[in-house]
Amino acid sequence: MTVPSQLWHYTCDHAQLKIGAVGQLIPASSQMNLHELLPLSDFVWLTDLGAPNREALGLTSRILLCDRTQHRYRVTEGGHAIWWMDLRRVLPWQWVDAVESTPGARPVHWWAAQDPVPVELADIPSVLGAPSS
Ligand SMILES: [Zn+2]
């Protein structure tokens, strides 16, 4: 599967403050020692969906506590991203099952990267205007 010409990353207010307007996405496991607990934290999560559909992206806050659709980042160099449908074959099935089983999930739109991914903030009005409560 060819890497789509445009990939996106959605995240919460807290992470946006750390990344800034232009920055790099880094797998959580390289910032904290999470590997054995959360194999999925070895990856930066990307999507080819330009609209923040929470269910499709699997960002339903069932596992994650924050609203991960508050901000959108445009990936400026995503050539090394791996398609989830390829990645899922080499991951423990329990983890695959956990992320794919949320209602409305559309895993064919998910991409992941293990190396830092350069991004720039590209919020869209519907994201900015969403009710915060
Ligand atoms: Zn947060």
Image (tube, rainbow, N blue to C red):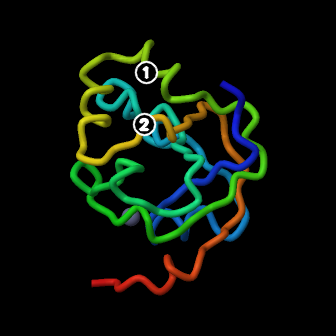
Residue shown at 29% from the left, 53% from the top: 64
Confirm if mark 2 falls within 8 A of ligand 1: no
Which mark, residue 88? 1
Which mark, residue 107? 2
Name above or below for residue 47 compared with residue 12.
above
Q: Nearer the viewer, residue 61 or 52?
A: 52
Horizontal relation, residue 115 to residue 88: left or right: right
Q: Nearer the viewer, residue 90 or 100?
A: 100
Secondary structure found at label 1 = helix
Q: In what quadrant of the picture does the C terminus appear?
A: bottom left
Which mark, residue 73? none
Q: Identity of the amino acid at label 1?
A: Arg
Mark 2 surroundings within 10 Å by alpha-carbon count, few (fewer than 14), some (14 through 19), many (20 or more): some
Q: In what quadrant of the picture does the N terminus appear?
A: top right
Res 65 → quadrant: bottom left
Residue shown at 59% from the left, 59% from the top: 50
Horizontal relation, residue 105 to residue 94: left or right: right
> Do labels 2 and 1 touch, CB within 8 Å?
yes
Q: Identity of the amino acid at label 2?
A: Pro
Residue 120 at what x, y percent from top left? 71, 63
Secondary structure found at label 2 = helix
Ligand 1 quadrant assignment: bottom left
Q: CA distance from mark 2 to mark 1?
A: 10 Å
Residue 51 at what x, y percent from top left? 53, 63
Mark 1 surroundings within 10 Å by alpha-carbon count, few (fewer than 14), some (14 through 19), many (20 or more): some
